[in-house]
Image (cartoon, grey):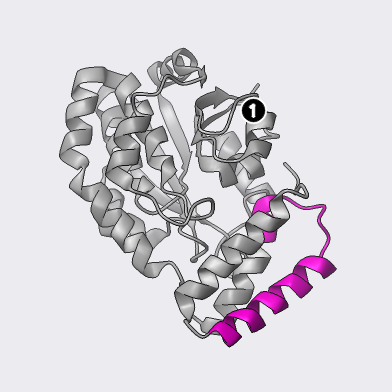
Amino acid sequence: MKVYLDCIPCFIRQALQAVRFCTDNVDEQERILRKILEKVLSMSWDITPPEMAHIIHGTIRERFGEDPYKIVKKQSNDVALSLVDWMRDFIGENGLDGAVRLAIAGNIIDFAVVDEVIIGESVKKLVNIKPVVYEIESLESSLRDGGSILYFADNAGEVVFDKVFIEYVRLNYQVKKISFVVKGGPIINDATVQDVEYIGLNGLEDVEILEISNGDDGTGPDRNSDEVKKWIKSHDIVISKGQANYEGLNELSGIFFMLVVKCKLVADDVGTKVGDVVLYHSK
């Protein structure tokens, strides 16, 4: 999925949000924002939204040398961890359907799209929304066949929901291995190895952690690289969480996309509306 004109103001909003997390100095905020605007004007727009995000947020990290979202990511993880007992009870009552709905609902924790998320309230509302696209029969059939899973994670906090989903899958299906993919460095509130370790997901049996690039050198292969395509081909089931992964992987077939639709452009591409809950199997 390529950048649309409507993506540009959204990226500028993201940039301002990140800069404000780093400094209260309005003059400094303006300087960095002007630098980002110059880069946006000079770069090619014939790229994917995640690729543009890499450039914009890399500029902010280069200036401040820190993760602007470090605090909100920890807060998201802590709030999500406080909901684990409720999650497990919900899955106990609803099985795979409950596990999938929870995993998708966790995708609401997305600071690339919103400035604030009331996690508990939002999630408990979303799990009761009837999905518009919901290919759970196809997912269940694949899980019954067993094998290996490649799981592209999205955000901090959300990974707690992913962990509970993975726990359910490991207990109820013959899954040999789960490769859990996170960013190799910080960008927005995307999950990293540090988040995975904080919530204990790396301690699950038969789970390995893989890293893809956040746009900085040495942080892993790009999501659209040949290496990542080899990962996809070498696993029996591929699950992709969230909008950014959808934007980067939607042209590939055989992927289960699980997300809350938060953008009209993505909604138009999937054939849904903003706010819809989706489990879509690309053909």
Residue 79 at x, y percent in the picture = 25, 52
Work out whether residue 18 or residue 223 is closer to the camera in this orientation and state it.
Answer: 18
Q: Confirm whether the magenta stretch covers residue 30.
A: yes
Q: Name the residue under label 1.
A: 270
Residue at (68, 51) in percent of width and height: 49
Residue 167 at x, y percent in the picture = 26, 35
Work out whether residue 180 or residue 157 is closer to the camera in this orientation and state it.
Answer: 157
Q: Which contiguous range is marked in magenta?
A: 26-52
Secondary structure beneath dot 1 equals: helix
Residue 156 visible in this rendered orientation of the protein: yes
Kind of residue at disc 1? Val
Characterize the magenta stretch by its predominant secondary structure: helix
Residue at (72, 41) in percent of width and height: 1
Q: Is residue 115 left or right of residue 121?
A: right
- Residue 107 in which image quadrant: top left
Q: Classify 126 as above or below 113.
A: above
